[in-house]
Amino acid sequence: MRGYEEEARDVSVTSIADSSAFRDQERILPHHQAALTLLQARLSAPGTNHLAWLDLACGWGQIIASLDENLSTEARAKIAFWAYDLDQEFARETRKTAECLGFASLKTKVGDLSET
């Protein structure tokens, strides 16, 4: 009988790039709403002057598409935002959106985490 670790090494995981990225300015997905709620709580905590946020598999930038309606200018100015995706076009679109949000800093990276 094979162990769990041996089975895990044999699993081939398709990339998120194989899925359909989603972007709709009028709609916030439930898991994005949950993340934004946590983000709002962290940013409103006393003494929070800086917060690093990695949007792994950022896609078209859906999670930040309506951020200007969900976080104040002051809150967004505390965020060091990192967007990471396998797809250059997705990262580029997320960056365009993020550039308008007034983050403390902004970095985007394209790559495959399995190659690092």
Image (spheres, rainbow, N blue to C red):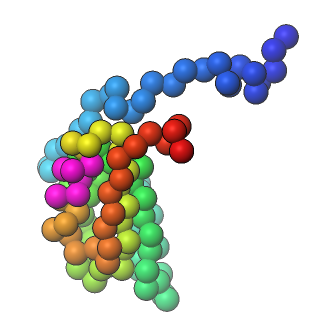
In the image, what residue occupies the spot 26% across and 36% down? Answer: 21
Can residue 94 be found in the magenta stretch?
Answer: yes
* Above or below: residue 69 compared with residue 11: below
35 and 9: which is toward the camera: 9
Q: Position of residue 57 (x, y in %)?
A: 38, 44
The single residue placed furthest to the bottom in the displayed view is 47
Q: Quadrant of the N terminus?
A: top right
Res 102 seen here: yes
Q: Quadrant of residue 15?
A: top left
Res 31 seen here: no
The single residue placed furthest to the front in the displayed view is 115
Can residue 61 be found in the magenta stretch?
Answer: no
State which region is magenta.
Answer: 91-96
In the image, what residue occupies the spot 51% across and 25% down? Answer: 13
66 and 79: which is toward the camera: 79
Q: Main secondary structure of the magenta part?
A: helix
Q: Position of residue 49 (x, y in %)?
A: 43, 85
